[in-house]
Amino acid sequence: MDKNFAARRRRDLIVAAVLAGLAALAPLFVKDVYVQNILILTLMYAALSQSWNILSGYCGQISLGHALYFGIGAYTTELLFTKFGVLPWFGMLAGGVIAAIIAMGLGYPFFRLRGHYFVIATIVIAEIGLLLFQNWEWAGAAMGITIPVRGDSWLKFQFMRSKLPYFYFALALCCLAWFVTWWLEDSKWGFWWRAVKDNPEAAESLGVVVFNSKMGAAAVSAFLVAVGGAFYAQFLAYIDPESVMGFQFSLLMALPAVLGGIGTLWGPVLGAAILIPMTELTRSYIGGSGRGVDLIVYGGLIVAISLALPQGLVSLFSRSKAKGATR
Amino acid sequence: MTALLETRGVWQRFGGLVANSDVSISVGRGEIVGLIGPNGAGKSTLFNLIAGVLPPTQGSIWFDGEDVTRLPAAARCQRGVGRTFQVVKSFETMTVIDNVIVGALVRNTVMREARRKAHQVLEFTGLAARADVLASDLVPAEKRRLEVARALATEPKLLLLDEVLTGLTPTEAQTGVALVRKVRDAGITVLMVEHVMEIVMPLVDRAIVLDLGKVLVEGKPSDVVRDPKVISAYLGDRHAVSA
């Protein structure tokens, strides 16, 4: 039994390495900038959703306010860069740390809430964050911040001529988020989080400090999402509150994980690989009519998948295994 | 030697309702003690106070020579109090082995060791064949067993069993009894709440009867069942007189 378990962990790692390797070769074949753009966004959302999944999937604290951490990552990086000339690489780390601290500060009162009340609190807090940034003059208020062009360089993490560096960074971020999840899954924290999700009272009786577990999950999750936000800001070269902190980001972090399989290792990547291209393609091919047909198709597909596979897309792969396990 | 567990003048009030009034009990090392009493006697409340789910309104709880009255459940588990729940609380989306690993992580921080410990406990409790099954797929008797396994994985000094034998078929209950004996033989003190008298009485070394939130009688099981006060608490005064 232990051998099976170790073998499965190793297999996951090998599959991930192969997929990452193949993804790294993609630019050799994909020269179209539009398609490259979709690939970058897909990888970014896969990374974000994987990070969201740590708090909401594994630990079961459903957050629909992660746009806040995304925005904090973006704003910290750009404010430090434009006002103090701090390189985006440091800004990215600073943004991650600030987001993690804010996540724990918010968790302190809100992790006492359960179920729907927690979800509502996360939405409200993210909206408050959005409003604050819309009115914060020093941070550009609703006008936002335009990132000054300093020429293509890895040092300044700025590229105008080619999107490929962004592609590789997004891929690296996606690998990082996946690997962190993989590593945490077979750790004390991973077990604690799943126990907290399934039954906090029983977890507490087995020595799990429920509150601290949630705080840990929130910090890791917020840190990684903020790094994603920093990346996105550099990628856009312009940010304003709505374009880095809008509610749609919270949804686009949650949806891939839910669709792919919430609380699973592969769910977010799988979900993002299907959902994000679908979002972009429906928008560009049938979105021009002004009648919202793209959104209808998009919403319809999500409903169809959720109805057919309530456990998420990963259940397609594990179905035979689950059958074998039940006797 | 001091008792492993002691409650000193413990009171618990829920608004106007007094669930436990001035309860002082002690459990010695290596004992199997039965906590019995009619419905609403305050057994579950006392259990929750001992496990640390909530602090008592008044009084103190001592475990292994330490005042644990204000310690939360997780801290008591770390000190060696293990428990099961009357209404089973398995981690339903996790496999049996993963359920037990959660418990084992209290004393083993290295995953490999926690996993090994969990396997040992599954062997001990007779669940080894079901290790990779989801907890939600277990039958009720197995779920009860999983509760015990999970608690044992925390390597408790005191195991609190909340009606683990209730609602089982006679055969299942007998296997349960054998498991409780085995646990005691492994050096673990057991305090159990139970309803099914004919199963509990031969098993326990000592019985404590609660009624209306107070300790009614305490003593050898054979004496306790003949005590007129106990009979009257369970069956009413008429029967007590005729006994």
Image: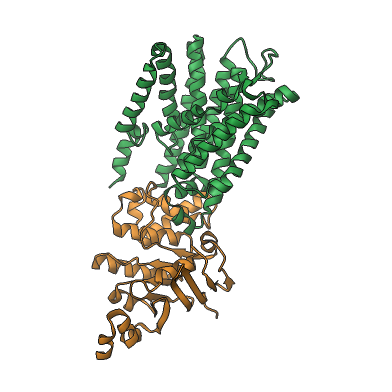
Chain colours: A green, B orange
| Number of marks in picture | 0
At 44% from the left edge and 17% from the top edge, which residue is drawn? A280
Task: Measuring from the top left, give residue A323's x and y in whole percent.
Answer: 29, 41
- Tell me if residue A59 can be seen: no
Query: x and y percent of residue A115 in the render?
Result: 44, 45
Q: Is residue B100 left or right of residue B126?
A: right
Rendered residue at 57%/33% (across/down)? A68
Instruction: Locate the N terminus of chain B and report the quarter of the image it occupies.
Output: bottom right
Q: Is residue B103 visible?
A: yes
**Relative to A35, residue A263 above or below:** below
- Location of the C terminus of chain B (image quadrant): bottom left
Q: Is residue A252 left or right of residue A220?
A: left
Q: Is residue B109 left or right of residue B217?
A: right
Q: Residue at x 40, y 31 (%)?
A: A260
Q: Toward which corner of the image does residue A310 lie, by quadrant?
A: top left
Residue B118: give x, y in percent of width and height.
44, 55
Above or below, A189 relative to A41: below
Judged left or right of residue B35, residue B27 is right
* Nearer to us in this view, A64 or A292: A292
Query: Residue at coordinates 36% horizontally, 75% vertically from top-left?
Result: B36
Please tell me whether residue A100 is drawn above or below residue B12 in the rendered image.
Answer: above
| Residue A236 position in % (x across, y down) | 59, 18
Farthest residue toward the right?
A84
